[in-house]
Amino acid sequence: MDNKMEVKILEIMNTVLDNRTKKKLTVLSPEMHLRNDIGFDSLDLAELTVRIEAEYDIDIFEDGIVNTVSEIFEKLNSK
Amino acid sequence: MNVLITGISKGLGLKTSESLLRNGWTVYGISRSKTEELNELLLQYPDKLKWLQYDLGDAEKIRQIIFKDWIGLDTPIHGLVNNAAMAYDDIVTNLNLDSLEKMYRVNVFTPMMLTKFVIRQMLLHHTKGSIVHISSISVHTGYKGLSMYASTKGALEAFSKNTAREWGEVGVRSNCLVAGFMETEMSSSLSDNQKNRIYQRTSLKKPVDVNSVAETIKFLLSDKANSITGQNIHVDNGTI
Ligand SMILES: NC(=O)c1ccc[n+]([C@@H]2O[C@H](COP(=O)([O-])OP(=O)(O)OC[C@H]3O[C@@H](n4cnc5c(N)ncnc54)[C@H](OP(=O)(O)O)[C@@H]3O)[C@@H](O)[C@H]2O)c1
């Protein structure tokens, strides 16, 4: 996993969590599940998508479901 | 306040833009043609009025052309008015599928896609936004020849109510302005006899004042309406 990207994604996720007054993350690991482990609901995931898209110009949910942190990195690295 | 509004070259869209600009808001307006009146408004508000020539029959390029290249993802959007529409009227037995599809693109699919990207932009900038779709009294009272047109507006009303429910918790509101018959280009093909029959079905017995509709749109966009969402607001001279 690209370290710069990892730091950026962690920062974006914490912005979303903070906006929704949810508990922020200290570390990010690839196997983490976006809903079950991080606690995102569908509206949080919408905000996450938009923020990632603003940074990388890729809509991670455009084709298919993304469930885990590693799947986000796969999407971002595949383009 | 930055407001995106479709169909600003004439009729209700032009009047609404004027009203929003008088309030000091910034208007991002779309239409295919630049009319004399629109040109005057552009000269009057060179900084606050931004105009894009775009055919809303094309729902594919919305994100790139409207949101990325023109408005810019860095600009917060506080309001969306889905006003542009076309009326394909005929009796049902003459229904032409191509005309129906074209009307659905302009009246339903593009407004839905605009709503998608506007909500995304609202999420990005954390703006509590307001969306107003222009619907028609024909959804609620039947008129001969308007089945197909009315069905597009009924779709918008359903879309609006569910959007309101889905996005309310992040502060995004969605309402429909249900307009009665106004004297604009859209209704200009009706004969005086047809118009009079329509006006006789209203309490006030006359055409709906376009300014009254425009002012209500402005109200729904503003913070004064911050407890109103998921509603159909009738401005129809009392069609009961
Ligand atoms: N008039 C009525 O009696 C009445 C009653 C109830 C509801 N409504 C609704 O009120 C709204 C406004 O109608 P109006 O009476 O003001 O109509 P109008 O005078 O015909 O104006 C329609 C506007 O939409 C724009 N437009 C139409 N098709 C477009 C396209 N493919 N791409 C871009 N812009 C497009 C037109 O601009 P260009 O031609 O320059 O593209 C124009 O600015 C509509 O949603 C209508 O359904 C009207």
Image: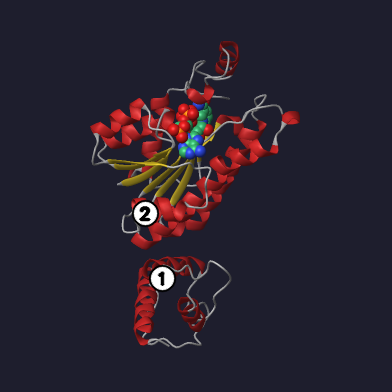
Measured as percent of width and height from the top left, residue B19 is found at: 32, 32
* Residue at horizontal 66 percent and vertical 26 percent from the top: B145
Find disc 2 in the rendering and name its residue: B69
State yes or no: discs 2 and 1 in contact (Cβ < 8 Å): no
> Mark 2 falls on what kind of element?
helix
In front of the other: B113 or B128:
B113
| The disc label shown at residue B176, or none | none
> Mark 1 falls on what kind of element?
helix
Specify few, some or many for label 2: CA neighbours under 10 Å numbering under 14, 14-19, or 20 or more: few
Quarter-of-image position of residue B127:
bottom left
* Residue at horizontal 60 percent and vertical 30 percent from the top: B138
Quarter-of-image position of residue B26:
top left
Find disc 1 in the rendering and name its residue: A52
Q: Quick check: can you spot residue A47?
A: yes
> What coloring was used for the rendering?
secondary structure
In front of the other: B181 or B57:
B57
Give the Cα distance between marks 2 and 1.
19 Å
- Type of residue at label 2? Asp
The chain letter under disc 2 is B
- Type of residue at label 1? Ile
Q: Nearer the viewer, mark 2 or mark 1?
A: 2
Measured as percent of width and height from the top left, residue B132 is found at: 45, 42
In the rendered image, the quadrant that contains the C terminus of chain B is: top right
Image position of B106 with respect to B190: above or below: below
Residue lying at the far right of the rendered structure:
B93
Q: Quick check: can you spot residue B236?
A: no
Quarter-of-image position of residue A26:
bottom left
* Residue at horizontal 47 percent and vertical 67 percent from the top: A59
Specify few, some or many for label 1: CA neighbours under 10 Å numbering under 14, 14-19, or 20 or more: many
